[in-house]
Image (cartoon, rainbow, N blue to C red):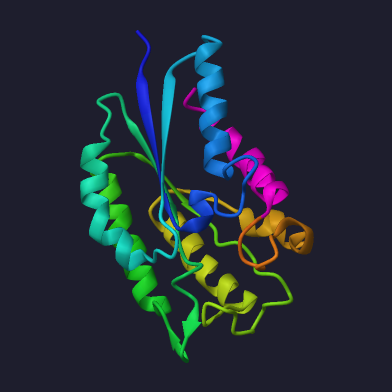
Amino acid sequence: MKKIVYGLFFGDSITYGEYDGVFGGWVDILKRYALQKFHEGNGDELILFNLGIGGETTEGLLKRMPVELSARNSADGNLVFLSYGANDLAIKEEIQVVEPEKFKNNIIAAVQQAKQFSNDIYLVSILPVSQKIDGVVVGSGKLRTNREVVAYNEILKDIAAEYSLGYIDFYAALFDDKEVLLSADGVHPNEKGYGMMAEIAIPVIEKYL
């Protein structure tokens, strides 16, 4: 008997797919891929939920996560993806939105919540920012640096290792070509960048199809 597995993608505007008017972002590409595989009759059904909210930090995640998890809980199993940090690490009015230690504690708390619903949890790296906005205050009033991105990604990697979680390293994959894979704002991917992210993530979901 075929199983119906749910995949829950928690994150910010990059999870949501902002600025991608062609494909709808990397999670939506994965949704279409999983649906296509199901219609080909190749295995279990994997239903993916894009739960990205623009501007969200790990603080917002912890508030809504219990409700989201219980509302989308498949008896056959769930996958949980946590994609946070780009807003947490930002500095606004000379104050870091969510400081590293708090970020670490929030991610651990989110993992512990997710573990009540799933044994398959993935942490997703923060993307690099474009050289043109690295260390620059942008229109939103936020300042980001690649140095901070690396530091927060190290926190995510350490948690993934400690709790035996999956880790999807988009940072390493996009860094060298970031100037052509990021949109004009220097933070969000463009269509090409989102496409590359989906290619990297497809082998992860393949295991559940």
- Is residue 200 a member of the stretch shown in magenta? yes
**In front of the other: 52 or 116:** 52
Residue at figure coordinates x 64%, y 66% from the top left: 128
| Location of residue 34 with respect to 58 vertically, above or below | above
Residue 209 x/y as whole percent? 49, 22
Reply above or below: 98 against 51: below
Instruction: Residue at 32%, 69% (x, y): give it.
Output: 105
Instruction: Locate residue 110: give its quadrant.
Output: bottom left
Q: Which residues are magenta?
A: 190-209
In the image, residue 51 lies in the stretch drawn in magenta: no
Helix, strand or loop: magenta stretch: helix
Direction from residue 56 to residue 200 in the image, left or right:
right
- In the image, residue 169 lies at what x, y percent? 60, 53
Most extreme residue toward the bottom is 94
Q: Quadrant of the N terminus?
A: top left
Numbered circles on residues, count: 0
Q: Relative to residue 135, is residue 153 depicted above or below?
A: above
- For the residue pair 47 and 186, the one nearer the viewer reads as 186
* Residue 173 screen position, x and y as percent: 70, 53
Residue drawn at 62 percent across, 49 percent down: 20
Give the residue displayed 28% in from the left and 46% down from the top.
Answer: 115
Left or right: 132, with 19 as reference point: right
Q: Position of residue 89 (x, y in %)?
A: 48, 75
